[in-house]
Amino acid sequence: MAEVTYHKPVLRDIVQMQELVLPEVKSGKILYRSDDEIATNIRSYTVAKAQNLIVGFVALHIHTPTLAEVRSLIVSEKFRGHGIGGKLVDVCKEEAKKLGVVQLFTLTYEQRFFERLNFTEIPKESLPEHKIWADCVKCKHFPICDEVALIYNLS
């Protein structure tokens, strides 16, 4: 496998990011984000690149001074099973620690993946209400959500 590097994206990366995530958006596994929304939040993303192609990315979204979310995690099907997803989550953990975040949460259909990274299932009702109305209302599955909420303690 080609060497994979991890770094912050630049605005011209948005086209590749959208192409990579499109199948998961269409299936309803990942929430659609417009180019403008990604551009506005570009500093929250980390990309994984191999041979100058984006093969994965993730976003760290801050909700409160102590709580952040791991969101929009995607790895190209061709590159799955090589630890890229885990490394992207590790990058989020490191960045969150530097910022002083205490807990990371995620809403996901990939429960076992996150449990392998020491996330623990929690009731969705324990998530901040503004999370539900700001993002979940855009989801094609809303209001019948079958994602699992998980949390990770950074301390």
Image (cartoon, rainbow, N blue to C red):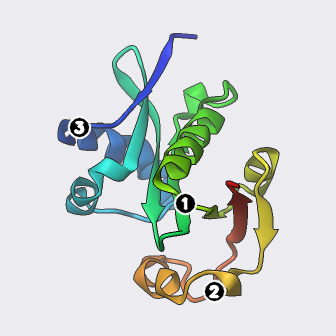
| Amino acid type assigned to the residue bearing label 1 in the image | Val
Point out the tag, 1 or 3, that comes first from the N-terminus: 3
49 sits left or right of 153 in the view:
left
82 sits left or right of 78 in the view:
right
Quarter the C terminus occupies? bottom right
User: Judging from the image, what secondary structure is the residue with disc 2 in?
Assistant: loop
Q: Mark 1 or mark 3: which is in front? A: 1
Q: Residue 101, labelled with which disc? A: 1
State the image coordinates of residue 122 (x, y, percent, origin top left).
Answer: 77, 74
- Distance from Cα at disc 2 to Cα at disc 3: 35 Å
| Amino acid type assigned to the residue bearing label 3 in the image | Val
Residue 148 against residue 80 in the figure, above or below = below
User: Judging from the image, what secondary structure is the residue with disc 3 in?
Assistant: loop
User: Along the line of sight, which residue is nearer the eye, 112 or 21?
Assistant: 112
Residue 126 against residue 63 in the figure, above or below = below
Classify 10 Å Cα crowding around label 1: few (below 14), some (14-19), many (20 and above).
many
- Distance from Cα at disc 2 to Cα at disc 1: 30 Å
Q: Mark 2 or mark 3: which is in front? A: 3
Q: Mark 2 or mark 1: which is in front? A: 1
User: Along the line of sight, which residue is nearer the eye, 95 or 76?
Assistant: 95
63 sits left or right of 88 in the view:
left
Q: Kindly indicate the quadrant of the structure image that contains residue 106.
A: bottom right
Quarter the N terminus occupies? top right
Residue at the location (72% across, 69% down)? 148
Point out the tag, 2 or 3, that comes first from the N-terminus: 3
Q: Residue 144, labelled with which disc? A: 2
Point out the tag, 2 or 1, that comes first from the N-terminus: 1
Q: Kindly indicate the quadrant of the structure image that contains residue 14.
A: top left
Q: Is residue 58 visible?
A: yes
Classify 10 Å Cα crowding around label 2: few (below 14), some (14-19), many (20 and above).
few
Residue at the location (49% across, 77% down)? 140
